Each structure stands twice: as C-alpha cells, then as structure tokens.
Amino acid sequence: DAGVTQSPTHLIKTRGQQVTLRCSPKSGHDTVSWYQQALGQGPQFIFQYYEEEERQRGNFPDRFSGHQFPNYSSELNVNALLLGDSALYLCASSLVPGQGNTIYFGEGSWLTVV
Amino acid sequence: AQSVTQLGSHVSVSEGALVLLRCNYSSSVPPYLFWYVQYPNQGLQLLLKYTTGATLVKGINGFEAEFKKSETSFHLTKPSAHMSDAAEYFCAASHNAGNMLTFGGGTRLMVKP
C-alpha cells in the first residue's frame, strides 16, 4: 500500500519564478492538506482540499494556490517566489475531514529559492 | 487561536535513560493531540494520538504520552532511550472538524552512547 507520495523531492528556483508541487494521497484517502516547514521550525498549515475544493486555509498569501483532481491527487502552486519561500513542503492525506482522523505525511519537496 | 508549545528545543539523554519531551497546548476546549517524529531529510511519522477515552496513550517504538487536562499538557515519554530514537519530535493539536494541525516548534532529541 503506497503511502503519500510527493514530487519532485528537491528543486531550485529563482526569485520571481513559479513552482508546482505534486502529491498523491495514501490509497483510500480523499482529503489532502499542504504544510510549509521552514528550516528549524514546525510545519505550518497552508490549505486543505476535499471534494476538489479548498476547505480551509492558513495564514498564507494568495501567491499560494492549489488544486485537487478527481482522483484526489493535488498540486500546490506558488507564484512570484520569494527567498523566504525556501522550505520543505509537506503533503498530508486523510479520510473525510473528521475529528482525530489519522493524518499521514509524505516525505516532502525541498524548495530552494535563490 | 490555538497554540502548541514544546519546552526545550534540544534534549540530550544517555542511551538507556528516560526520555521526556514536553508539550503544552492552549485551548479552552481540549483538542485532539498528536506526536510526530521526523528523521533527517524525511517526512513526519505518527507516533501516537489522543482523541477521546483513555488519557494514557501508547504509541509505536515504546513511546507513550499522557493527556492531562488540568495541566493542558501532553508530554511524551519512553522508559529507555535507544540510539535510533535520535530525531526531531513534534507535538500537534487539531481542534476543528477539518483536521488542520497546529504544530509546536519541535524538540530535537539527541541520544548519547
């Protein structure tokens, strides 16, 4: 049973560019969330997708956007990259949003902005 | 707004010694609580979670945590540390129906031989 898979694992972008990160949820999961983890810090919630709609959003600017496809996979897009966007981006999946459902994380995509 | 605080960004113990990692949450309503472990250059792995019921929760790799409502705490313990326990540990809380997790800042556990 494949867990949460993310691609690419590492990438380097230049300030001002745009990036797209991809995530396939764990088999059977229909809810995908994205987190940003800056170096030396805990992950911060970006947004969550369920039934192809953004259901919740954390305190991130509109430069961060996402999409969920009918097969539950998801993309995270970041426009106009800033140096401060350099971080590990984690995708997490779970079943229908519910209290205390186990959330599984992928290994993340390391983004470096230069 | 809910917050999670982990006391001690770095904890060092000797192999075989007790591991105690501290976590406190701020919430008027007890949240659902989780501990995750992150090994270098990897994602997060769930160690254990508290939802309802028994306040002492047992997890993987010999870890356990106790939910104490009166102290708003959810400390993680392991009776005997192993070298393979060296990693970053994150406490997290979920309060709403959407499973959004609020993480603490993390505690790096170092295990000395």
Image (tube, helix red, strand yellow):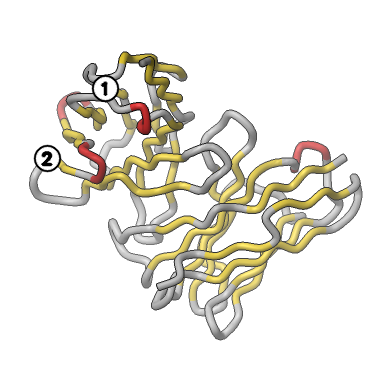
Q: Position of residue A32 (x, y in %)?
A: 51, 66
Residue at 57 percent across and 75 percent down: it is A73
For label 1, the crowd category at 10 Å Cα-Cα, with few meaning under 14, some 14 to 19 and many 20 or more, is many
Q: Report helix, strand or loop for mark 1.
A: strand
Q: Is residue A91 left or right of residue A96?
A: right
Chain assignment, label 2: B
Q: CA distance from mark 2 to mark 1?
A: 19 Å
Check disc 2 and report the residue beneath it.
B55
> Looking at numbered disc 2 in the image, what kind of residue is underneath it?
Thr
Q: Which residue is mark 1?
A: B19
In the rendering, at what x and y percent does residue B93 appear? 35, 43
In which quadrant of the rendered image does the C terminus of chain B lie?
top left
The chain ID associated with circle 1 is: B
Looking at the picture, tell me which residue is in the foreground, B45 or B26. B45
A22 vs B42, left or right, is right
Label 2 residue SS: loop
Q: How many other residues sit within 10 Å of disc 2, few (<14), some (14-19) or many (≥20)?
A: some
Residue type, label 1: Val
Are marks 2 and 1 in one subunit? yes
Residue drawn at (82%, 56%), measured in percent from left and top?
A: A79
Residue at image coords 39%, 78%: A28
Vertical side of A17 occupied by A37: above or below? above
For the residues carrying marks 2 and 1, which lies nearer the camera in this image? Answer: 1
Furthest toward the front, the residue is B113
Which quadrant holds residue A94? bottom left
Q: Quadrant of residue B24?
A: top left
